[in-house]
Image (cartoon, helix red, strand yellow):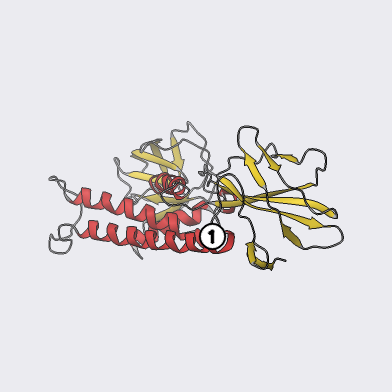
Amino acid sequence: MATADTMDHLVNETRSLLVGSLPDDLSVLGQPYNPGDATINLRYPKKNLAPGSFVSVGLNTFYVLANGSEGSEIQVIPMMDGGPDVSVPEATIVRCKPRFTNWSIFNNLQAEIHSMSSPLSGLYGVKHFEAAVDWANGTYPMPADFGDVIRLLVARYQIAGTDQWYPLSGCEYQREQNLVRLVGAAALNALNVQFVFAIPFTEPDTLEQTIESLGISPEMADIPTLGCASQMALGNEGRRMQSFSQGDARRPQEVPMGANTSVSRSFAEMKKNRVNEELARLTATYGWTQQSGVQQPTAGGYYNYGGNWQGLT
């Protein structure tokens, strides 16, 4: 079952935005599927699943070649919408003739997550590392598994025997050497230093991945779903414009020209507003910082580090 912090949940949230309460025809796998298998087994038979239909199981999209007389053994061809051919465990939900396949939604969510940390959107994830004070060199190499960095947000030090953090000035991230260098010095009784970075979001690979593992905070979880829904609603409009039979019983007046385009624009506007809201939240927490270092505090003022406003003397 999808939990509130997985890609599976985002896929289902996007589907709900697009189709509301209209359900797909569902079954579940009666046996595990392994890459290269020529059939899938349905625990709850679907005798009406005709050849030529699509079936969505996890990230797999199958083309139905034949349906057995009992409706439980389905002969299939995998990877029909450009998706992968991957293992799926028993009892996984099977979507028969889905309006949107899991892969098509997941693929669009990947693109939306990638765009969230583009310069145009300006959003980012937050990650930090700590180290003991290096009195000799004042340099702090990045951990080997830290990943990509957009810029340094916060540099601060901790005094021995306390849990309070104080801002460091004269600090810069040197991308070429992949390290942080302190130009100034920490207090003589400093114990540790901490560096907080803006990081780009990581594109997901599986439905089971959590959004936190991608760098996405729970507050931002609706942004990729809104962007994905906007893109996929345009696909509905393209389908409506086709000159051949579409397989629907809807009358032209029920779905007027441009209706789906209007829905797409509404989702896009909602996404834009949410991006602006989250960008304002990040700015309020971490402030505006330069690429080469952190802001310089002024005597008698206040400075925001990690959401904690601290008085400076």
Q: Nearer the viewer, residue 203 or 176?
A: 176
Q: Residue furthest front?
A: 299
Q: Does any portion of residue 311 appear in the rendered image?
A: yes
Q: Nearer the viewer, residue 66 or 106?
A: 106
Quarter the N terminus occupies: bottom right
Q: Amino acid at mark 1?
A: Leu
How many numbered callouts? 1
Q: Residue at x 31, y 44 (%)?
A: 53
Residue displayed at 39% across by 37% down:
75
In this rendering, the answer to whether 196 lies above or below 36 is below
Report the side of 245 relative to 191 (left or right): left
> What is the x, y in percent for residue 99?
32, 52
Dot 1, how many residues are within 10 Å of its Cα: few (below 14), some (14-19), or many (20+)? some
What residue would you read off at disc 1?
282
As rendered, which of 66 and 53 lies closer to the eye? Answer: 53
Q: Answer with the quarter of the image where residue 69 lies.
A: top left
Quadrant in which the C terminus is drawn: bottom right
**Residue 195's x, y, as percent?**
68, 50
The residue at 44%/57% (across/down) is 223
Task: Name the side, left or right, on which 38 lies relative to 284.
Answer: left
Q: Answer whether residue 99 is visible to the viewer in this image.
A: no
Q: Position of residue 138 (x, y in %)?
A: 76, 41
Q: Position of residue 258 (x, y in %)?
A: 18, 57
Q: Left or right of 121: which side holds 267?
A: left
